[in-house]
């Protein structure tokens, strides 16, 4: 199964890719929301781990577009962000994210969430 990792930081992408490999996923990387949309439409990953704050197109906008597209709407999207403002979780949910994690995230909690979302 493929997992799309979307973050503007190559360091963070690498960390999350390594974690996803440990969970048995084949990671695919995108550095912004626009690239994530193209990859998701072409590769149909089992799950998307999306940073919310990125240049060009942020994760909120990318999530809204993916969730409004019948070809990608069913793909679970997990927000992983360093934004810890009180309204960030609500903003991510309103965009269509299925789960929300703050950086640094807990690997075991992320694992349990992914298992729940892609039963």
Image (cartoon, rainbow, N blue to C red):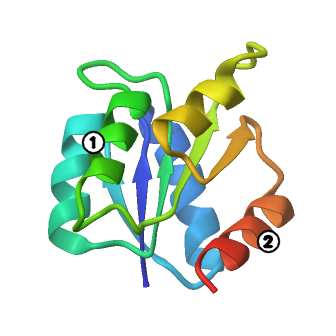
Image coordinates for residue 69, horizontal then vertical, percent? 23, 55
Image coordinates for residue 21, horizontal then vertical, percent? 56, 75
10 Å crowding of disc 1: few (<14), some (14-19), many (20+):
some
Residue 35, quarter of picture:
top left
The residue under label 2 is 112
Residue 40, quarter of picture:
bottom left
The residue located at (58%, 69%) in the rendering is: 20
- The answer to whether residue 73 of the structure is visible from this angle is yes
| Outermost residue, top side | 85
Image coordinates for residue 87, horizontal then vertical, percent? 71, 17
Image coordinates for residue 57, horizontal then vertical, percent? 27, 25
Indicate left or right for 100 with 65 as reference. Answer: right
10 Å crowding of disc 2: few (<14), some (14-19), many (20+):
few
Indicate left or right for 8 with 111 as reference. Answer: left
Near-viewer residue (74 or 58) = 74
The residues tagged by marks 1 and 2 sit, at their Cα atoms, a distance apart of 26 Å
| Above or below, 9 relative to 67 | above
Quadrant occupied by the N terminus? bottom left
The residue located at (67%, 28%) in the rendering is: 90
Element type at mark 1: helix
The residue located at (24%, 64%) in the rendering is: 70
The residue under label 1 is 65
Element type at mark 2: helix
Quadrant occupied by the C terminus? bottom right
Residue 24, quarter of picture:
bottom right
């Amino acid at each position: 199964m493929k997992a799309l990792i979307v973050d503007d930081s190559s360091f963070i992408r690498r960390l999350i890719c390594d974690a996803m490999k440990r969970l048995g996923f084949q990671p695919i990387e995108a550095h912004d929301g626009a690239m994530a949309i193209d990859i998701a439409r072409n590769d149909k990953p089992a799950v998307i781990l999306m940073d919310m704050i990125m240049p060009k197109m942020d994760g909120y906008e990318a999530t809204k577009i993916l969730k409004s597209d019948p070809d990608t709407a069913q793909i679970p999207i997990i927000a992983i962000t360093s934004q810890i403002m009180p309204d960030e979780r609500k903003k991510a949910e309103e965009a269509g994210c299925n789960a929300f994690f703050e950086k640094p995230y807990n690997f075991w909690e992320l694992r349990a969430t992914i298992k729940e979302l892609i039963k």
